[in-house]
Amino acid sequence: MRTLNVAIIGQNFMGKAHSHAWSNAGRFFDLPAKPILKVAVGRDQATLRDFAERWGWQETASDWREVVQRDDVDVVDVAVPNDMHAEIAIAAAEAGKHVFCEKPIGLDADEARRMLAAAERAGVVHYLNHNYRRTPAVMLAKQLIDEGFVGRIFHWRGAYLQDWIVDPDFPLTWHLQAERAGAGPHFDLGSHNVDLARFLVGEISSVSAMTARFVEARPLPGAGAATFSAGSGGSGEKGPVTVEDAAFVVAEFANGALGTIETSRFALGRKNHHTFEIYGSDGSILFDLERLNELQVFSRHDAAHVQGFRTVLATESVHPYIDAWWPPGHVIGYEHGFHHAVVDFVHAVVDGTPLAPTFADGLRETLVLEAALESARSGRRMEVEPA
Ligand SMILES: NC(=O)c1ccc[n+]([C@@H]2O[C@H](COP(=O)([O-])OP(=O)(O)OC[C@H]3O[C@@H](n4cnc5c(N)ncnc54)[C@H](O)[C@@H]3O)[C@@H](O)[C@H]2O)c1
């Protein structure tokens, strides 16, 4: 069987989620090539060796620049903070490697443009990991919209709310520094919600937005500080938070729909509350990631005496990807979206099956996100620049 040698850069939260998917997807799905977990690249060699052993990476390395040049690497998986995406993805593409890259695509639209140009020039597969698209219930929402269940779409009501930095003593991790993250929850969480809005409703043409920062300075992090964790140590000194803590956007879609996109890491009790509501002329659809197997649907065409929202459990074999997993009702979870992304990525590399979202989508969504930041700064409604 054909093999695809994968190099992963990054060994923490996304490092684990991706490693699990690369090693496990072929057990459930018939893949046209077997992913080989060739080499894991990280900064901390002691923990990297444990990581590699636990997840089955054959080798470890410390310098991603050397690794992306290796003849025995076919795919580069970018699972590091946002400020490193562009440099790694461009170097990998120029070395002829297919690129599987975490979101948001980079720090700004300029980086996204350069990443897209490099990948197109090299003719490699480029994928931006908005894993939530590949949740069966979300794919079902897309199918229902395409089949006309919703009719003309009037509204997108999107939100992605978390609460992990409400404590003012939570340290100044890379997520809270503009030069490393680009922006705060607006990029981190908003990129996911804009991706689903574009996937399900269409292009966003103009935006108005407000942002807020609730904590101005935070303790400098100790070693190992990463997503959702405070790390160890810390000097007691503080540094400035340079991203927003929350962003609320009103969006106009090219097809006339009106939407909202709320993101915050200060919504106490909301752990990973990624939701959308779509309201149309014939029906409505609601999704909540914390109930990811379910889709709430309402149809105006149901008989009047039984009208109301009903819950579809998207775990039947007719639902996307489910046939490869478990019998009906044997629900799937967060990690499955990463598996589905790996499956479709491998097909794109081996048999050219179209894959989305790509770096072109990353550029478009960044233009939306940047227009919203500019609106928040200027107090003006902003047209979204064409890609
Ligand atoms: N798709 C999703 O749902 C999702 C969820 C969380 C994070 N992300 C994205 O994934 C990316 C990584 O996020 P995370 O939460 O895993 O971050 P993290 O802080 O938990 O881990 C980052 C990793 O990058 C490593 N790293 C940093 N600099 C490096 C270098 N020079 N060489 C090698 N390794 C280096 C760190 O050691 C660490 O292992 C970010 O872009 C983030 O936005 C996506």
Image: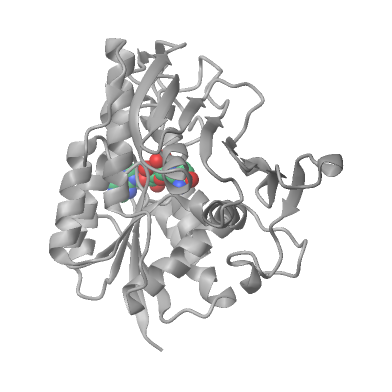
Q: What's the residue at 55%, 27% (across, down)?
A: 164
Percent x, y of residue 139: 55, 56
Q: What's the residue at 38%, 21% (across, down)?
A: 220
- Residue 225 shows in this picture: no
Determine whether, in the image, residue 142 is placed left or right of residue 332: left
| Above or below 274: residue 318 | below
Viewer-nearest residue: 372 or 331: 372
The total of numbered circles placed on residues is 0
Q: Looking at the figure, which quarter contains the N terminus?
A: bottom left
Viewer-nearest residue: 49 or 35: 35
Determine whether, in the image, residue 323 is placed left or right of residue 239: right
Q: Looking at the figure, which quarter contains the C terminus?
A: top left
Percent x, y of residue 229: 52, 33
Percent x, y of residue 206: 33, 27
Percent x, y of residue 125: 28, 65
The image quadrant that residue 365 belongs to is top left
Determine whether, in the image, residue 90 is placed left or right of residue 229: left
| Above or below 247: residue 331 | below
Name of the residue lying farthest toward the bottom: 1
Q: What's the residue at 70%, 61% (across, down)?
A: 315
Viewer-nearest residue: 350 or 138: 138
Name of the residue lying farthest toward the right: 305
Viewer-nearest residue: 153 or 92: 153
- Residue 148 shows in this picture: yes
The figure's colour scheme reads one colour
Q: What's the residue at 22%, 33% (across, down)?
A: 385
The image quadrant that residue 219 belongs to is top left
Q: Quadrant of ligand 1?
A: top left
Determine whether, in the image, residue 1 is placed left or right of residue 364: right
